[in-house]
Amino acid sequence: MEVKDDITVKEYFEEYVPKLFEEQLGGKSIPDMDGTLFTVQFDVDGQSYTLKVTDAKSLEVVEGAVDTPMIKVSLSEDIWRKAVTGKLAGAMDMFTDMGTMANRRSYNNLQSAKGTMNLSLDAGGETVEISVCFNGADSPACTFRSTVEDWGKVSTGQLAGPMAFMQGKLKIEGDMPFAMSLSNLMA
């Protein structure tokens, strides 16, 4: 689904995201997801929107922040806009692809993740900064440095994180045990 270049944050979350959710899940029932509540909050230059997904089949978009979302993604509006309009392919895939995240294993791994992951991604000379806080925990913390393309491959499972690290395509700073634990969240 194409996103227009001048879309507002409000339009994106209130109009586009519900359509994307329906397109990705199409009313399908995901096995073993009854009784789950997945919350992801996006903070885009002071504008907050929270997505609440119940039982991996219904979506509620909430304007504003919620207490302790499972994932809190913070980024600038410029980076957000480039990501949602496809100009930074791969930068947001791990947060918006419900088909990948909608399974019990990913959900359980996400529930146990505690800490903050900072992404510093090279997008052809421009640095893309995204902060991801898991379950309200500021620490431990780590920073992943990569290109947007390589990060997209790692976050979608096309390239294993350890392999990307060994090949020098992924650099990690900060709390290494926490960084390694995040591999459970990748596709």
Image (cartoon, grey):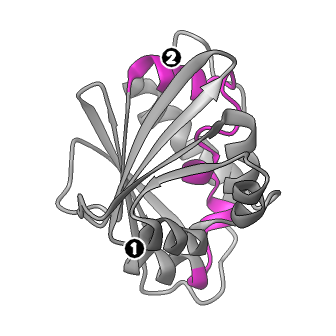
| Residue type at the position of mark 2 | Ile
Is any atom of residue 117 visible in this view? yes
Q: Residues within 10 Å of mark 1 (few under 14, many from 20)?
A: many
Locate the N terminus and report the quarter of the image it occupies: top right
Residue 135 higher or lower than 91, as above or below? below
Residue 24, labelled with which disc? none
Residue 56 seen in the current view: no
Q: Which residue is mark 1?
A: 113
Q: Nearer the viewer, residue 113 or 55?
A: 113
At 76% from the left and 62% from the top, the residue drawn is: 157
| Residue 73 or residue 96, whichever sits in front | 73
Q: Which residue is mark 2?
A: 7
Instruction: Farthest residue to the left: give it.
Output: 67
Coordinates of residue 141 in the picture (x, y in percent): 34, 58
Disc 2 crowd rating (10 Å Cα; few below 14, some 14-19, many 20+) is: some
Locate the C terminus and report the quarter of the image it occupies.
bottom right
Measure the C-alpha gap from mark 1 to mark 2. Answer: 32 Å
Magenta stretch encompasses residue 181? no
Residue closer to the observer: 171 or 62: 171
Q: Position of residue 45 (x, y in %)?
A: 29, 24
Can you name the residue that lies furthest to the bottom here? 32
Q: Is residue 28 left or right of residue 142?
A: right
Q: Could you tell me which residue is drawn at 23 percent across and 62 percent down?
A: 136
Highlighted range, magenta:
76-105
Give residue 66's position: percent from left, percent from top. 20, 55
Rendering quarter of residue 169: top right
Q: Left of 145 or right of it: where is 54?
A: left
The kind of secondary structure element at disc 2 is loop
Residue drawn at the location 60% of the way across and 53% of the way down: 94
Q: Amino acid at mark 1?
A: Ala
Residue at x-position 43% and y-position 80%? 36
* Dominant secondary structure (helix, strand or loop) of the stretch shown in magenta: helix
